[in-house]
Image: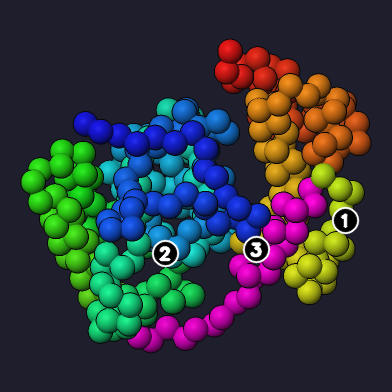
């Protein structure tokens, strides 16, 4: 069985994942994710244009999407819509495991502006109220979708002759199940367009560009043209973190990269990522990484 595993999700300053999933002529990739192999122990906040279909293989996994948290048990799955910010963590321990199918919606909708795209794909992709669909095996229509997700996983790994065509057929049937079940919800949903995500993305971009500086909540809020209190509310609604908490997380992320990729001393890295003192840096680093900066460097550096 062929498995693709990554150890870190790479994103740009706007939290968009930078990797291209699949190839131009067959834009789909399947990842088998063992959380104990991720450098951070979990999949950080990110978003991508691709649809994501995930299936929990072992133990429990928690998806955070907006201000909601969904815990999947083995045998359960989830569809994460296009352009939706999400984070994935082990529920309790990092021995859990899942696989994810990341696919360009064109595999379902066909050519740009096709009838299928306009009538059956875009109403889901552009629906602000439909960020995800949980998939449980005890609900018949969802059980059917899970069956096709597992079928695609098997085809991808076994690669029988014509597997690409069969995967596309499975996606078509899978999508048909979704739109038939959700048609009333899609049709009747009032697009209460919230700018929360766009504001947060602007704020995140500012943090990613200026994290090494002495930035304030006012700086972050001004970037998104909102008040400080509204900025905090937006972050809480979308990321379940305050702007300051996210800033600390991001500084530690950048510090962990420098510890492994450079020979700089820990004291220099401390100031490079925006901390004013090595003692406080060590305390925050241990909070997020469960070890000291020197232990982290010793454990993960390539010898």
Identify the residue under disc 1.
216
Which residue is found at the position 58% from the left and 60% from the top?
Answer: 67
Where does label 3 land, which residue? 201
The image quadrant where one finds the C terminus is top right
Q: Residues within 10 Å of mark 2 (few under 14, many from 20)?
A: many
Which quadrant holds the N terminus? top left
Q: Is residue 122 above or below residue 266?
A: below
Could you tell me residue 16's position as x and y percent?
55, 57
Would you say 227 lies left or right of 95 here? Answer: right
Confirm whether the magenta stretch covers residue 199.
Answer: yes
Q: Is residue 90 above or below residue 295?
A: below
* Pair 3/2: label in front: 3
Q: Nearer the viewer, residue 207 or 23?
A: 23
Mark 2 or mark 3, which is nearer the start of the sequence?
2
Helix, strand or loop: magenta stretch: helix
Residue 81's mark? 2
Mark 1 surroundings within 10 Å by alpha-carbon count, few (fewer than 14), some (14 through 19), many (20 or more): few
Q: Earlier in the sequence, mark 2 or mark 1?
A: 2
């Amino acid at each position: 069985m062929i498995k693709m595993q990554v150890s870190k999700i790479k994103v740009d300053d706007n939290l968009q994942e930078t990797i291209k999933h699949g190839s131009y002529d067959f834009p789909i990739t399947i990842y088998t994710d063992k959380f104990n192999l991720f450098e951070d122990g979990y999949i950080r906040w990110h978003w991508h244009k691709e649809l994501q279909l995930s299936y929990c293989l072992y133990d429990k996994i928690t998806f955070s999407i907006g201000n909601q948290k969904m815990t999947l048990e083995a045998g359960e799955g989830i569809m994460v819509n296009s352009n939706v910010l999400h984070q994935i963590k082990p529920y309790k321990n990092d021995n859990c495991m899942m696989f994810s199918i990341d696919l360009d919606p064109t595999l379902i909708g066909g050519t740009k502006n096709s009838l299928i795209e306009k009538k059956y794909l875009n109403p889901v992709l552009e629906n602000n109220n439909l960020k995800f669909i949980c998939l449980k095996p005890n609900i018949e229509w969802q059980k059917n979708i899970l069956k096709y997700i597992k079928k695609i996983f098997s085809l991808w790994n076994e690669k029988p002759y014509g597997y690409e065509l069969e995967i596309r057929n499975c996606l078509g049937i899978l999508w048909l199940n979704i739109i038939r079940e959700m048609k009333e919800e899609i049709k009747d949903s009032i697009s209460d367009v919230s700018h929360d995500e766009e504001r947060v993305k602007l704020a995140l971009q500012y943090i990613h560009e200026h994290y090494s500086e002495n930035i304030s909540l006012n700086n972050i809020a001004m970037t998104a043209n909102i008040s400080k209190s509204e900025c905090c509310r937006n972050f809480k609604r979308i990321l379940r973190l305050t702007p300051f908490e996210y800033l600390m997380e991001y500084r530690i992320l950048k510090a962990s990269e420098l510890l492994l990729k450079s020979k700089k001393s820990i004291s220099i890295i401390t100031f490079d990522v925006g901390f004013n003192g090595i003692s406080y840096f060590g305390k925050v680093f241990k909070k997020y990484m469960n070890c000291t900066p020197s232990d982290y460097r010793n454990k993960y550096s390539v010898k």
